[in-house]
Amino acid sequence: MESLLVYPPVLLALFAGLFTWFVTALGASLVFFFKDINIKVLNAMLGFAAGVMIAASFWSLLAPAIEMAEGGKMPAYVIVSLGFLGGGFFLWLVDKILPHVHQGTNHREGIKTSWQRSVLLVLAITFHNIPEGLAVGVAFGGLASGSPAMTLAGAVSLAVGIGLQNFPEGAAVSIPLRRENMSRRKAFFIGQFSGMVEPVAAVIGAAAVVFIAPMLPFALAFAAGAMIYVVAEELIPEARLGHEGDIATIGVMFGFTLMMILDVALG
């Protein structure tokens, strides 16, 4: 694996982003085989995705950020707290401005518009996946810092974890759209589109920390805050639709455990 270090971190981030997009497309492709999905299965998948993101936010982002920020001019907890809250605030601001609609509801948020529901759903999905791409990009971009807290194995484990939770996410988007009588091809396109933004966000995140190395602890915490905002705003509420909250909670526990194992074993 260490042989990959000969490649620029931004290029590695691009490859990792393409991988997470590919896994999203694989999940979305299930729409060609299934028209419906059991609500318990859907909630479990969304809960699993939430668990992975929560674990990744700490093990792969916040913990290295704290370690790297220690010994600086400002206390580590100040830098990490500002970054974490900044990531959440940025996503909250985008949430208030960007027109979108949440999966499973007809409630429209953001600036009022006459756009079709399918367009608003694509915007919501895209908005959801930007933090994941940024997190992967920042993790790979951090390799350029030479800090012991940032390792190739840790960045790879984050990309693998994000990819794993993207598979059920892709299916959780495309199959319900098929249930609403959308064509399989269009439902697949919207489902895989949710991951299309991740390679772009990964490259932006990696480039930012490569060229502005001192901001790495803040950037790691920023990505973690953005991911936790998505979990609290999108995944957990959607995973509890249909009064099947227990199965979603179990999904969260398994997702968190798997991501923790990946990070500790590979990182």
Image (cartoon, rainbow, N blue to C red):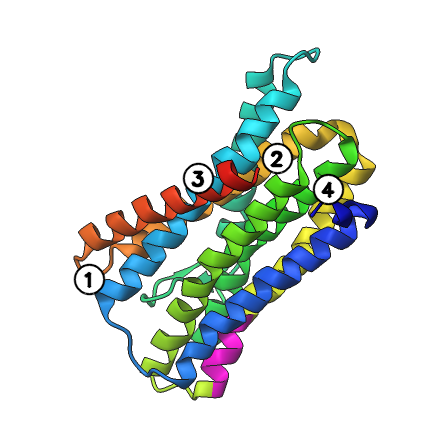
| For discs 4 and 3, the disc positioned in front in the rendered view | 3
Residue 190 lies in the magenta-colored region: yes
Residue 35 lies in the magenta-colored region: no
Which tag, 4 or 3, sits closer to the chain's start? 4
Q: Disc 4 marks which residue?
A: 141
Q: Residue at x 63, y 15 (%)?
A: 70
Separation (CA) of disc 2 from disc 4: 10 Å
Identify which amino acid the numbered label 3 is placed on.
Met
| For discs 1 and 2, the disc positioned in front in the rendered view | 2
Q: Are marks 4 and 1 in contact (CB under 8 Å)?
A: no
Separation (CA) of disc 1 from disc 3: 29 Å
Q: Disc 2 marks which residue?
A: 220
Residue nearest the observer in this picture, 105 or 134 = 134
Separation (CA) of disc 1 from disc 2: 35 Å
Q: Residues within 10 Å of mark 3 (few under 14, many from 20)?
A: many
Q: Position of residue 232 (x, y in %)?
A: 38, 44
Q: Disc 3 marks which residue?
A: 260
- Mark number displayed over residue 151: none
Separation (CA) of disc 4 from disc 1: 41 Å
| For discs 4 and 1, the disc positioned in front in the rendered view | 4
**Mark 2 secondary-structure assignment:** helix
Q: Residue at x 78, y 37 (%)?
A: 144
Q: Are marks 2 and 4 in contact (CB under 8 Å)?
A: no
Residue nearest the observer in this picture, 175 or 96 = 175
Q: Position of residue 236 (x, y in %)?
A: 33, 50
Which stretch is magenta? 185-192
